[in-house]
Image (cartoon, rainbow, N blue to C red):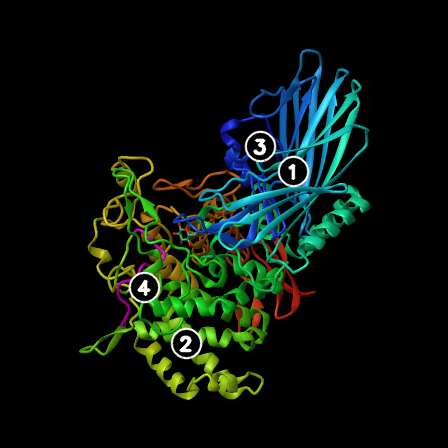
Amino acid sequence: MINWKIDEEGFFEDRITANGNKFLVGNGYMGIRGTLTEYDKHKFTAVNLAGIYDQVGDGWREPLNAPNGLYTTVELDGESYTLPDKKPAFHSMSLDYRHGIFSRKTTWKTEKGTLTVTEERFASLKEKHLITMKYTVTSERDGIIRLITGIDGDVWDINGPHYDDVLLSEEGNIIKAVGITHESKDKVVVFEVYNADFLSTEEIHKADRTISRVLTFHAKAGKTYTINKFISVFTSKDREDYMDRAKTVVDGAEKAGYEAALKSHFKEWEKKWSISEVTIEGDDAAMEGLNYSIYHLHCIAPRHSDSLSIAARGLSGQTYKGAVFWDTEMFMLDFFLFTEPEVAKTLLKYRIDTLDGALKKAKSYGYDGAFYAWESQEGGYDACSDYNVTDVFTGRQMRTYFKDKQIHISSAVVYGIMRYVNYTGNKDLLEEGGDRVILECARFYYDLLVKRVPIDRYELHDVIGPDEYHERVNNNAYTNRMAKYTFDSAVTVLDWLLKEKSLDTKALEQKGYDLKGLKATYEDAAKRLYIPEPDEKTGIIPQFDGYEKLEDVGLGELKGRILHEKEYWGGAYGIASHTKVIKQADVVTLMNLFSEDYSKDLLRKNWDYYEPRTEHGSSLSACMYAMLACKCSMPDKAYPLFRKSADADLSGGGKQWAGLIYIGGTHPAASGGAYMTAIEGFAGIHEENGVLKAKAALPAKWERLSFKLIYKGDLYGVMVTKDRAEVTLL
Ligand code: BGC
């Protein structure tokens, strides 16, 4: 059995950044990086907020980090004890990932005796605007202790500073920091109240965007002194009375006390695990990695909103601009569909509510329909820049075409909505505008079709598939198949609209949609759209036109050509661009999604062909290979790839740089991919004529895999061994 704890003993300065991700706590509204209370912005400290962005000058638009209300340092007899400046005698950090609680203990040797501090903190899962922290200090000798504790508004920004000003004030026992954002003059408000089990003198200091209390007291040898901090975080976007609420939340929490806040937080986490826990008998390490991944998905679920999605790096900071990619629909959605469909709905509502942004984006390129943002921020604004990578050799910006050419993003939105309809059995999302999204995505692909007149077929040219190393290719198999899926889905939805009274057909007709005409159009498009076929001799589906003619170099040999450790492999001159080496699962993603269209032999041939040619340079890659391996009855080949996904944030691996751009952070798509691999791969959960079925493909060590899931509103228990697979209605 696992103990639901991640522990690290010893202090390693070079792990500060990676541990910020590994020890993160969060509640969907905010993520608090696993850094220490004494750290400032140079240690990538952040209370990262969901769904609120700012841009300064020509810098990238990115999400905000709130002023850090946890900020605390300690002095004994005039000497400061902080990491990393003062080497500790003992240091440990721990994350209780069953309950989202971070703790640390650090002991320093002083001239006489030791000084020990502990902290424990969480972002309440019950009250999403509340952070709570318990901080203790114990000295082995009598002395004067000064605790400096407050709100640090000099926050870490990649392209900031995002606050033009940070207003510092106090009111009764509350101290406040209010950041005024640069672009929209929104306010980010942090209030803090504390209580202590000792008497001290208190002074308030304000300097450098930081407000702090200095608590000074005579410490007795061996006695532990405790303060509890209650911190509320709101923004002016949350609600009109955000200031009043910020006060009510800290006042209420302080009155009820630390233990009460902890108890309600704890209970909320247990509720989540009562459905989402996955048990693996025979392999504790895998069970730990998987549930730790699930922990991260819970930490970033936007439960405080009914229309918000998840950024590619979750709530771990500003990398990837806090933007939403296809990662959400294709990698994270299933977890929420199976364990908390309301959250799945919130994620997809975000796409419905950002349709206007997608229509505008299509129009800006001269196309009809909905072209969703490759890097979506609020309103569907595409934050993806034309220059995503810096050439390490010349220092020049490289033109990349992710935003312009990764048209498969719109089909991911359609896929998400249709999957929601299928797995919940509800058409509510269609009624709330999902129908229009699907029709507009179909319209977009329709407008992009290139007709090859002599052979009377449609193609899609000049695109980028999931493998970003090969830009501007024709007939990327994945993209074409997903466009066909979009046309098919549009036809299904049009059928429902024409036949079912419950759907609001009139609203669409009034908007000018000719439902019957569109149905015929998209039926035809789906039929004529070219889907690259497996080669007759080899069985391999070419990733795009001409892929087979590229240089077939081994991954090892290609790596030997690297001149700079941070050079970019794709783009015009990248080392992979003119070879068959790909960044991430592409054809394999296609085969995974549409495995029923191919024989097992073909699935296997393509897996065998593409896997050695894949760098797995994106954390989205391994799980697709893992799932397809399960479908090919190769669970032991799937296993290391599953572990790679599940352990992505535990091991602190993964790419930290793309060219000269820092891309570190948590990897929610890998977490979601690990979940999908366990549920849909190893347990083989799938639908058969509207009935949920399991089909076991367990790795050698696994004796039993069990979990619960929600399907069409009912809760099921699933238990899988090597020779049994049971799905039971609970
Ligand atoms: C991958 C994309 C992914 C993005 C965000 C990129 O490196 O190639 O497929 O959507 O990261 O995770």
- What is the distance, in whole Å, between disc 1 and disc 3 at their CAs? 10 Å
Residue 310 spot, x, y in % from top left:
53, 56
Sequence-earlier tag: 3 or 2: 3
Q: Please say if the residues under marks 1 and 3 sit with CB atoms less than 8 Å apart.
A: no
What label sits on residue 477 in the rendered view? 4
Circle 4 Cα neighbour tier, 10 Å, few/some/many (<14 / 14–19 / ≥20):
many
Quadrant in which the C terminus appears: bottom right
For disc 1, the marked residue is 70
Q: Dot 2: what SS?
A: helix
Q: Earlier in the sequence, mark 2 or mark 1?
A: 1
**Are the two marked residues, 2 and 4, in contact with CB atoms closer than 8 angstroms?**
no
Residue closer to the observer: 213 or 303:
213
Please state the extent of the stretch shown in magenta in the rendering: 459-469
Q: CA distance from mark 3 to mark 2?
A: 53 Å
What's the amino acid at mark 2?
Asp
- Where is residue 59? Give x, y as percent: 40, 47
Residue 22: x %, y % from top left:
55, 40
Query: In the drawing, does residue 667 fall left or right of residue 345?
Result: left
Looking at numbered disc 1 in the image, what kind of residue is underneath it? Answer: Leu
* Mark 1 or mark 4: whose residue is earlier in sequence: 1
Q: Which residue is the site of mark 3?
A: 39
Q: Residue furthest left?
A: 454
